[in-house]
Amino acid sequence: MNKGTAIVGFILSFLAGMLLVWGIDRGSNGTASATREKGAQGSAVDGKGANPGAVAVELYVMSQCPYGVQAEDAFKAVVDKFGGDIDFKVEFIGQEKDGVLTSMHGPKEVKGNLVQICAMKHAPAKWYDMMLCQNKNMREVDTNWEACSSTLGINVEAIRTCADGEEGKSLLATSFKKAAEKGARGSPTIMIGGKKHEGGRRAPDLMKAICNAYSGAKPAACSDIPESPKVNVTLLGDKRCAECDTKRMEGQVRQKVANPVITTLDYTTPEGKKLFDAIKPVNLPAMVFDATLDADKDASTALARGLKPVGDYKVQAAGGWNPLCADDGGCNIEECKATLQCRPEEPNKLEVFVMSECPFGVKGLDAMKEVLENFKKNDAKIDFRVNFIGDGDASSLKSMHGQSEVDEDIREICAIEHYGENLKYMDYIWCRNKNIKDKNWQSCTGGDTGIDTAVIEKCFSGDEGKNLLAKSFAYSKAAGFGASPTWLANGKYKFSGIDPETVKTNVCKYNKLGGCDAKLSGPPAAAQKPGAAAPGCGG
């Protein structure tokens, strides 16, 4: 072989190698094919990095958020299918101030975040498997990582050293900053190809969104994504109701149902009244599914908690508007007398509807300390009351965050019942809110709170507390409130918020009180954006 032939051969070999590196192979006809093979250069979660041209997929979560955990689990099938054809990254939502890291669900969540981000650094091929292992018991993410790491062959001491030291703090602070820069406040927030994903969070929905994000040729994984069954759903609203807009509900449907066929009806039309008659009693707005929902098992499971079978339909009510009460003479109907539509206005009254373990409810109740102090120093009096959100009667009480929340609801309502004078019960609630999940509730009795431990224990252990909570649940349900916190001014005007300024402003919107000119703390910067919804638990 002469020198020139050798050089030509080297160049051809080099170019062929580069084509393989770029994920481009040659078909039998000798033309270049742009189809990337799954995992050609490794996977985004196996430590080898993503392929050239991979779509960026970013998941922003809190390690103890059930919805974030669901999204992490859903991405397992996506990662398995696409491999290195997506650049999959998980970041965390929280705050860093003066070197102190905080997250919505408390110190245990911060520790969970720390061990997971340290695993990304020190076990790049196994961090995702560790995360999925921990998700089997998300309440213990601060401790269950050790067993998960050992099972997966991850160096436990490397993770511990990182999580307990400055390295972990630095990694998590950087992750918090990334989430803030992307405007990720809710868990999960999903970004696909640099754009926020507003669609469904099930694996097939995510796969379709990823395939739509490719600017050029799509990978082979996009060729066989299963088509989801069509599901018929009617959104029933009432134009006479300011809060019955079905657009938000439509977004919820699209997140949980992969292939919805959506029809929107108004109660004031003949078709709307006919449907309402078939599903009543129910408040509006409402989602109304027919039998096609049964074909979509994932959607049926995702919606199961809120669905109520009514004849040939399955119905989920998402509001507190009874259209019958708005009809002529409606307020004379017995069931309408307790609704907001028919209640008389009660000046200077403020109510809040909460779940005791909801982080947003906790923030709302804590905000009342500044609100109450402001009105008190200005000699203004408001009638403030706390109500609880949940389901069931005294024999079967249920709440979103489980039995521990029901138990705390009972203790707090017992404090309200026995220490209502001068809102003394708020000292107990504010004390508990410092660590709402601490089982040692007794530490918030006696001493500075002046709450008798024996009084709360007797009320809690007997029928009194259960009956009080069942009554509070029924009152909240009659008002149509399911999100914590929800505020009600003067018995008529609903609003949301978790900061003192928002609460004060809405009280003063309907009442002339001393202290209304004062500027209180808040609201958070994100909440100041036009149309931004206040955070809360439930809906």
Image: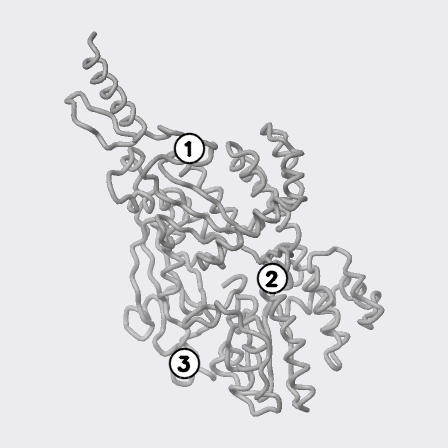
Q: As drawn, which residue projects farthest toward the front?
A: 3
Where residue 397 sits, quadrant-wise, is bottom right
Rendering coords of residue 338 (x, y %): 53, 78
Rendering coords of residue 395 (x, y %): 66, 59
Rendering coords of residue 62 (x, y %): 55, 51
Rendering coords of residue 481 (x, y %): 52, 69
Q: Is residue 295 visible?
A: no
- Please tell me which residue is depicted at 58% across the width and 64% down the height of the picture: 360
Mark 3: secondary structure: helix
> Quick one: 15 or 173, which is closer to the camera?
15
> Which of the labelled discs sits on residue 43, or is there none?
1
Tally of numbered tags: 3
Q: Quadrant of the N terminus?
A: top left
Amino acid residing under circle 3: Ala
- Please tell me which residue is depicted at 52% across the width and 47% down the height of the picture: 69
For marks 2 and 3, the one nearer the N-term is 3
Mark 2: secondary structure: helix
- Residue 324 vertical placement versus 211 (above, below): below
For label 1, the crowd category at 10 Å Cα-Cα, with few meaning under 14, some 14 to 19 and many 20 or more, is: many
Amino acid residing under circle 1: Ser
Amino acid residing under circle 2: Pro
Q: Is residue 293 left or right of residue 338?
A: left
Q: Is residue 21 left or right of residue 452?
A: left
Where residue 430 sits, quadrant-wise, is bottom right
Q: Would you name the residue on which mark 2 appears?
A: 359
Q: Is residue 338 left or right of residue 249?
A: right
Discs 2/3, front: 2
Q: Would you name the residue on which mark 3 appears?
A: 326
